[in-house]
Amino acid sequence: MRLLKRMAATALVACVLPLAVLAQKPKGKDQLVTISTPQGDIKLVLFDDTPQHKANFLKLTKEGFYDGTTFHRVIDGFMIQGGDPNTKDDDPRNDGSGSPGYTVPAEISAAHKHVRGAVAAARQDDRVNPSRASSGSQFYIVENHDGTPMLDQVYTVFGQVVDGLEVVDKIAEQPKDGRDRPLSDIKMKVTVEDVKKKKIAKKYNYNYNTQTLEKK
């Protein structure tokens, strides 16, 4: 009888353990990025499994590289794009062609989809960039509420908006010219702070196991 009880207890633990592991609260801290714009603030987290993109974005942010750049390309129902240093000058014709002078090796993963609020790296076309290396600074945020799956495994997705999706919508809706450039500059200031993962998960309903926002 004792043997049967022991076996039953062992089986119960084996069944419960995976659930317990999944239910564990995230430990440690993460970097919470805030992009401040005239339309409001966008908060996002960057993925640990795209380490080169995460490190590069945080480096540029801490250097103040993004401050004063604009969202120079906005397409309602698709995405908003920014991070080009050329947008700081007075020539709108060169917007979209700037960079910090280097690219970031592709970190494309099937695990990261172009869902609403996905943060991904812009890049040059496959014909001149067969390795699909990312721009050193330009990025875009998916605005389409259903996502843009046609871009999956084509561009590196390296983060997720956890707050301010409505701000992304507002930016995408701004009046623009024939090149999808907003008629009024949408300047950004980007900051980063260390925040406990537990707090981010709870406050923004973000799941660190799946690296996605949970439906409310």
Image: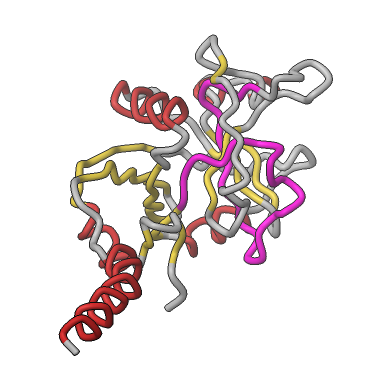
The residue drawn where x is 27% and y is 58% is 200
| Image quarter of the C terminus | bottom left
In the rendered structure, does residue 147 fall within the stretch colored magenta?
yes
Task: Give the farthest residue toward the top.
Answer: 101
Location of residue 192 in the rendering, given as x and y in whole percent from the top left corner: 27, 38
Location of residue 150 in the rendering, given as x and y in whole percent from the top left corner: 77, 50
As rendered, which of 24 and 204 lies closer to the eye? 24
Task: Tell me: residue 182, above or below residue 212.
Answer: above
The residue drawn where x is 39% and y is 38% is 48
Q: Is residue 201 left or right of residue 155?
A: left
Q: Magenta stretch: give its range.
A: 133-160
Question: Where is residue 101, by image quadrant?
Answer: top right
Location of residue 87 in the rendering, given as x and y in whole percent from the top left corner: 55, 26
What is the tally of numbered marks visible in this picture?
A: 0
Q: Is residue 67 visible?
A: no
Q: Is residue 58 left or right of residue 140?
A: left
In the rendered structure, does residue 135 fall within the stretch colored magenta?
yes
As rendered, which of 53 and 14 lies closer to the eye? 14
Q: Is residue 6 visible?
A: yes
Task: Give the farthest residue toward the bottom.
Answer: 1
The residue drawn where x is 39% and y is 49% is 44
Question: Where is residue 40, by image quadrant?
Answer: bottom left
Location of residue 78 in the rendering, given as x and y in whole percent from the top left corner: 69, 54
Task: Tell me: residue 47, above or below residue 55.
Answer: below
